[in-house]
Amino acid sequence: MELGLSLGEAPTPFSFLDHKTQKNNMVNNKKDQLGFCMALGNAFRSDQEKRDQVEDHDHDYDHHDDDGDEHEIIRRSRRVSAADPGVPIQLDLLPSVPVPRSHMITSSQFRFPWLSDNLVLSEPGSLDGLGKGFDVNRLPAAGAAAATEETEEGVTISSPNSTLTSFHVDFCVRNSSTGSGRDNINNHNNNKRDHINIELDTERASSRASDDEENGSTRKKLRLSKEQSAFLEESFKEHSTLNPKQKLALAKQLNLRPRQVEVWFQNRRARTKLKQTEVDCEYLKRCCETLTEENRRLQKELQELRALKTSQPFYMQLPATTLTMCPSCERVATANPAISAATATNSTATLPLAKPIIHPFSHAQAGKASAS
DNA sequence: CTCGATTCTCTAGTTACATCA
DNA sequence: CCTGATGTAACTAGAGAATCG
């Protein structure tokens, strides 16, 4: 009988994984037939699944919890323990873009544009303006001239006059130029600092975006505001891909060009995948270490058994048929119970040999033998 | 039904820029 | 102020799928 480890065959999923995770991993493994079961979610599913998701969105935009985003990966990876090297490793992932608590939006606090035209926010102050619709990239005064703008995809963005006023009235203390606003901010008390910084942030984004529109083709890099990033992040948690309808709705809501939303999602997927690759790499590294250690242990055991064989030549010269595995129950039936005991305990004690040979596949006898 | 052109969206890789230590 | 590292928005190329005539 031989014992071996093999990669390449269809794996039997680890029992510690729940059914859903197993299913996901089987999907992952099917592709390259690695036959390796990992306690990690599938951040990127097959094209067919993605298409299915897009089609689902055309019907309804309900949240599907089995979306394999990295947060799901975190939850699933936490179900396993790293304490035992033989047990798969716990891998803790932090969200890739840590959002300050004060800027966090939970999905229960608002709804996405494709769910409803209005966002519902429960935390005033931290995200002022969100609930009334984003306008952070619009020019405060001059931008109003462009009350209706045509995006690159021919989408008309509605007039900003509904939100612009309230959003900027609160922060009229700052300078109109981008850089010099900091001096004013320093004079304010700490309670307002965060609030103002957010505004400064959005204002920078606003001025750059407007510059970009003025310059046209020049590649001016826009830094998305915290609110925009947080909103996109929450949106990404819901769905890692967008259909055109969602993209337009999101762009309209955030006052970004649809192309910007599209690019953000592309880059976000790339970041997630990169992170997932790092996690996979780390996991495989640890698996390799575990297997190396196991291999070392088995080699040592083999050496000890060989040593036993040389020190007990007569004892080991028993007929081969006396140590046999039952093919049905996979129990080792031995003619000499002491041999199995010695093998199991790796003992080198001298053993009595004058015992009758038991039929290897007689379960009743084998059971009796093992019991003795 | 098949075929080629077109369009759209994706990934992977890269570049350019903003920010920070 | 300068500089290198880092993060990320934006770009490019190429592939695959869907659509249309």
Image (cartoon, coloured by chain):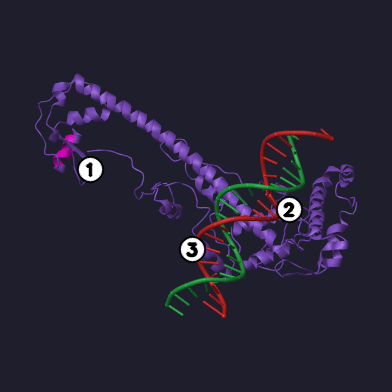
Chain colours: A purple, B green, C red
Q: What element carries label 3?
A: helix
Tell whether A234 sits left or right of A194: left
Question: Residue A297 in the image: x percent, y percent?
Answer: 35, 29
Tell whether A355 sits left or right of A203: left
Residue A330 image label: 1
**Label 2 – label 3 distance at C-alpha:** 32 Å
Residue wearing tag 2? A224
Question: Residue A178 in the image: x percent, y percent?
Answer: 85, 49
**Label 1 – label 2 distance at C-alpha:** 63 Å
Q: Mark 1 lies on which chain?
A: A
Residue wearing tag 3? A48
**Which-is-in-front pick, marks 1 and 3?**
3
Which three-letter amino acid code belongs to the residue tagged 3? Answer: Gln
Q: Which chain carries label 3?
A: A
Question: Residue A203 in the image: x percent, y percent?
Answer: 82, 53
Instruction: Please report the bounds of the magenta region as a residue range.
Output: A364-369
N-term-proximal mark, 1 vs 3: 3
